Image: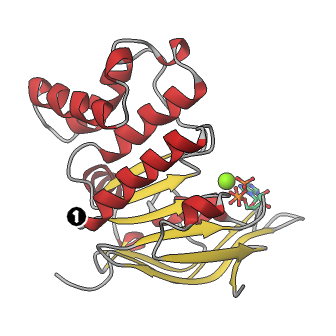
Amino acid sequence: MSGPLLSMVAAGRVHNADGPVPVHALRGVDLSVAPGELVAVMGPSGSGKSTLLHLAGGLDTPTEGEVLLDGVSLSGLSVKARAALRRRSVGYVFQDLNLVPALTAVENVMLPRELDGVRVRQARREAEAALADVDLSDVADRFPDELSGGQQQRVAIARALVGPRRLVLADEPTGALDSITGESIMKLLRARVDSGAAALMVTHDAQHAAWADRVVFLRDGAVVER
Ligand SMILES: Nc1ncnc2c1ncn2[C@@H]1O[C@H](COP(=O)(O)OP(=O)(O)OP(=O)(O)O)[C@@H](O)[C@H]1O
Ligand SMILES: [Mg+2]
C-alpha cells in the first residue's frame, strides 16, 4: 500500500498527568514518514526527541492523539499485537543501546531475527552480513563489555538494520562515532531508506542531518519552525 508508513496525529505525552507536577514531554506533534524518506529530529536536551521515537515505535503510548503504523492505530492493538508488529517492522537504535550483556555481538544482532522465527543458521548469516556492513566482522564473537563505545553503537545499528525492517528509529546512532565512521553509518542508513524503508533519526550533528530529506526541530515538546 502507498501512503506514509508512520503517521503521528496531534500526538502528545504527559508524564505524571495526575500528579503534582505533570510533565508535557511532547505536544501536538503531526508527523508523517513515507517509505523512502529519512527524517532527522533535532532539538535541545529534554525537548522530547526520545519521547517522540518511543511513541513512533510503540514502546510508549501517547496520552493525546494517535500513532499509526501502515495506517493502523497502535492504540487499537493489544499489547501482544503491538509487540509483534514492532518486532517484525521496526528496527530501533536506543539512546542507551540496550545490548544484551550475556550475548556476543553476533548473538545480539541475531536475536530479533530469531524472535521473528528465522532459523538459527539463517539468522547467523544475516547477522554476520549486518556486522560486516558496519565493519565489525572481526569482533563478532566478543561480548558488549569487550567492545569500545563506538563498536557497541555499531552493533546496535546492525541489530536495527538486520532483516527486512521497514521503519528504522535511531536515537543519536552516531553519537559515539568519529566523523568518518559516522558518515559511513549515515551512508548505510541512507541506502536502506533508498531501498524502501522509512527512518526517523535523532541527531545533534548538522552534517549527519544533511543526509535527511527533512529535518524536524523540537522545542519544549513541540515541533517548531527554524
Ligand atoms: N518517565 C518520565 N517521567 C517524567 N518525565 C519524563 C519521563 N521521561 C522523560 N521525561 C521528561 O520529558 C521531557 C523530554 O524527554 P526526552 O527524553 O524525550 O528528551 P530528549 O530530547 O530525548 O533529550 P536528550 O537530548 O537529553 O536525550 C524531559 O523534560 C524529561 O525530563
Ligand atoms: Mg533523548
Q: Is residue 173 left or right of residue 131?
A: right
Indicate whether 135 appears above or below 207: above
Residue 95 in the image: x percent, y percent?
60, 45
How busy is the neighbourhood of tag 1: few (under 14 within 10 Å), some, or many (20 plus)?
A: few
Quarter of the image that includes the N terminus: bottom left
At which x and y percent is residue 199?
40, 64
Q: Residue furthest right?
A: 20
Q: In this rendering, does residue 86 appear at all?
A: yes
Q: Residue at x 36, y 27 (%)?
A: 108
Which residue is painted at 30% across and 58% down in the image? 191
Please say if 38 is above or below 71. Answer: above
The front one of 64 and 219 is: 219
Of the pair 52 and 175, the residue shown nearer to us: 175
- Image quarter in which the C terminus is found: bottom right
Q: In the picture, residue 32 is in which quadrant? A: bottom left
The quadrant in which residue 163 appears is top left
Per the image, the residue denoted by label 1 is: 195
Callout 1 amino acid = Ser
Classify residue 53 by image quadrant: bottom right
**Could you say where residue 131 lies in the image, as x and y percent from the top left?**
31, 31
Q: Looking at the picture, does residue 204 appear above or below residue 67?
A: above
Question: Residue 176 vs residue 14: left or right?
Answer: left
State the residue at coordinates (13%, 36%). 118
Residue located at (30% from left, 37% from top): 133
